[in-house]
Image: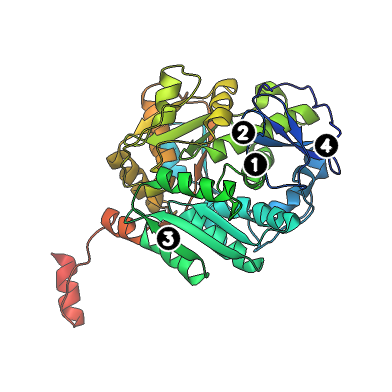
Amino acid sequence: MSLSLSADRPTVPDEADNGVWLECIECGETYAPFEAVRYTCDECDGLLEVRYADLPTFDDFEGHGVWRYAPALPLEEGVTIQEGATPLYEVPRLEESVGVEALRIKHEGMNPTGSFKDRGMTVGTAVAKELGVGRLACASTGNTSAALAAYGTRGGMETLVLLPAGKVAAGKVAQASLHGARILEVDGNFDACLDIVQDLASRGEVYLLNSLNPFRLEGQKTIGLEILEAFQADYDAFPDRIVLPVGNAGNTSALYKAFRELVQAGALEPEEVPKLTGVQAEGAAPMVEAIENDADEVRRWDDVETRATAIRIGNPVNAPKALPGIRETGGTAISVSDEEITDAQRDLAREGIGVEPASAASVAGLRKLRAEGIVDDDERVACLTTGHLLKDPDAAAAAGGDPEPVPADTDGVLAHLEE
């Protein structure tokens, strides 16, 4: 099935359950949503998407947080820790220095476990309970493991996380540990961890809750819905562009799906859809390579390195969904250096917004695109920041200033300040 911005509504198949079904984006094969555990198409191994017979408009949403958007989700309620409804911060000094008409920061680090992953897990764990599975698992650069552990234990399920040894920020490992996950440190990178957990899932040992799982991306759609509603309230218009960090490309895929469904529902015109613009670190930029080369698929990078650990991924599994999302919306993708990421992290901190390095990639990318003339000065832009500063306290300390030793008396402190 083509992932285009078409107003055509999907044909409801016999497999639909209460108006919900799964459909392969490659061959169009359809499946019942909850009768069996399924991550990819049985026929061609293509990625699956959740489809709906009834697509809501903005008038159908009520309540607060992720589950305000229940009419756009596969279940009416989830395993919840009050996720979503994150701030869309104004950043006047940053807005002026970047040189755009409006710049807002959607800070997903303000979710319960400190990252956007909570939006996916509230839906994913609810579907796991619907399917009757007991052990949840993920491969992770850190944030997924923290969210899985918190929502899994909230839902009364066992959780297993596979992490690349020595490559995950301490704050994230601590979260997964405290929430009771069983943590396996793999002698390899994130992509090796994902290979293993996918094999475990195929053997029926675990229920996979990485973004390969189509239900998890449904929760992440709500980021886009919140941004659109907030911009409409503040500017009486939708944003021209949304800039976001890219690791496994789940958010790019999820936001594009949210916008496609709004177009099909008649709530959004195709020309109103924001340009989806992805940013990767230079040391882990397979999506950027594909966009720059006009390639139909992503080439796996086996060696990836960046201090932005959350996006240190060389094989983004959602590329088949994300590449059309960037292209169909008129967006682009760009890579930035670790130094540019740290500079952007400092710039955000000066506005009072604390983010981990991967989050700051969106602002670093916007700066670079603006300098290159790809982003115009009259654009209204939302930058997505995906995780809280305290997710990676070591990186935050390295980016900040050093403590200054002073004597243990007031006069000594004043003398030091005058120097």
Q: Which residue is mark 1?
A: 214
Mark 1 or mark 2: name the one nearer the start of the chain: 2
Mark 4 or mark 3: name the one nearer the start of the chain: 4
Q: Amino acid at mark 4?
A: Glu
In what quadrant of the picture does the C terminus appear? Answer: bottom left
Q: Secondary structure at mark 2?
A: loop
Q: Secondary structure at mark 4?
A: loop
Task: Between residue 299 and residue 29, name the one nearer to us.
Answer: 29
Q: Amino acid at mark 3?
A: Leu
Report, in whole angstroms, how far the alpha carbon at label 2 lies from the one at label 3.
27 Å
* Residues at marks 4 and 1 touching, judged by CB atoms closer than 8 Å: no
* Residues at marks 4 and 3 touching, judged by CB atoms closer than 8 Å: no
Q: Can see residue 198?
A: yes
Q: Position of residue 97 (x, y in %)?
A: 38, 37
Q: Which residue is mark 2?
A: 47
Q: Residues within 10 Å of mark 4 (few under 14, many from 20)?
A: some
Mark 4 or mark 2: name the one nearer the start of the chain: 4
Q: Which residue is mark 3?
A: 184
Residue extending farthest to the bottom is 409
Q: Can see residue 360?
A: no
Q: Amino acid at mark 2?
A: Leu
Foreground label between 4 and 1: 4
Applied colour scheme: rainbow
The answer to which image quadrant residue 247 occupies is top left
Q: Secondary structure at mark 3?
A: strand
Q: Position of residue 244 (x, y in %)?
A: 49, 38
Q: Which residue is mark 4?
A: 15
The answer to which image quadrant residue 77 occupies is bottom right
The answer to which image quadrant residue 192 occupies is top left
Q: Residues within 10 Å of mark 3 (few under 14, many from 20)?
A: some
Is 373 located above or below residue 308 in the figure? above
Is 193 located above or below residue 40 in the figure? below
